[in-house]
Amino acid sequence: MELAEKIDPTLDLAGEIVRLKKERNAVILAHYYQEDDIQDIADFIGDSLQLAQAAKSTAADVIVFCGVHFMAETAKILNPSRTVVIPDMDAGCSLADGCPAPEFARFRAQHPDHFVVSYINCSAAVKALSDVICTSSNAVKIVSRIPKDRPVIFAPDKHLGAWVRKQTGRDDMVLWNGTCIVHETFSERKLIDLKVRHPQAKVIAHPECTAPVLNLADHIGSTKALLEYTRQSEASEFIVATEPGIIHQMEKYSPRKKFIPAPGEDESCNCNECPYMKLNTMEKIYAAMRDLKPTIEMDEAVRLKALKPLELMLEWSA
Ligand code: 13P
Ligand code: SF4
């Protein structure tokens, strides 16, 4: 039986979630790509770095992580005494899934003298094989901290890696060949079409986009950085080259500004939406809080190895 069939359709889900939050002493953390109704019941909305910091410092007993698996796993690594529940265990990420730990270990072994920087969009097992973790908001800062005479491996996003390589001038950087299935679909040609039709609009893009798309951007940054830019900019129109879930907060902060989602190559497929993020629903959040499952569990040895590079990231981005 499908989950939705088991839940009374007349139930006030938002009200029940608030009730369970008190009963369980829970905090709801949500990423900007979540559906609007989920963002509206969250205690905290943020980018990957902000969510990791919030998970580490929370006093709540239960963390309800409305995002994808690697984010919830990061919360557990940083705060293991909390129960971390995720509404849908299948909420993966093409970057994390495209970088299996055994293959990554072989890749690393081919470059034994390299300093290993892994984007937070990877599994705990890959984090455990890394020297430092980064997010899109601190990647340039983190890579700039690595001594110049030390070559660098950057995994698993080759587009973010190429952008960081350009920003830092670290031409020695070796990239793992991974991509985000959402950000790589933004079309350069369609973006140029949109720019022609909206000449006043600023183009804002996430660094997981391809180089031709990033070359068209007026501002590049993490989800939080893009949101901040739209709040502070004097422009009144923005073409948004990232997952359109972020537009909910952009419209809340700047109700008089116009936000145009950048299209994917094939406009009929909603390819600019993250299918993993969108697996989470209010019904699943309610059920996860009611049943306290599914929970994130992991091997303690792996957790401790993954914690080290995560702590170094937090130290270097402070
Ligand atoms: P941010 O850290 O910028 O929110 O990015 C997370 C992500 O998965 C982007 O696709
Ligand atoms: Fe992963 Fe891309 Fe979805 Fe972000 S948008 S969670 S990088 S698949």
Image (tube, grey):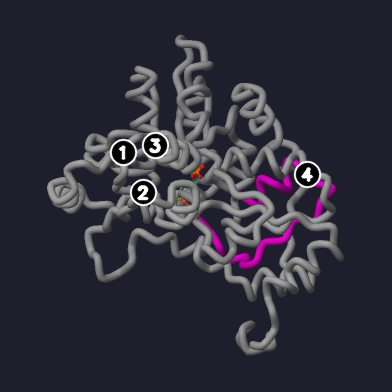
Closest to the observer, 78 or 214: 214
Q: Residue under circle 3?
A: 160
Front of the two marks 1 and 3? 1
Q: Position of residue 265 (x, y in %)?
A: 22, 59
Q: Residue under circle 2?
A: 257
- Asked whether the viewer can see residue 98, the reply is no
Q: Residue under circle 4?
A: 58
State how far apart marks 3 and 4 are (Cα): 29 Å
Front of the two marks 3 and 4? 4
The answer to which of marks 3 and 2 sits earlier in the sequence is: 3
Q: Say left or right for 230 vs 112.
A: left
Q: Say left or right for 123 vs 27.
A: left
- Which amino acid type corresponds to the residue marked 4 in the rendered image? Thr
Q: Say left or right for 109 vs 263.
A: right
Q: Residue at x 29, y 46 (%)?
A: 237
Label 1 with label 2: CB-CB less than 8 Å: yes
- Residue 159 higher or lower than 239, as above or below: above
Q: Secondary structure at mark 2?
A: loop
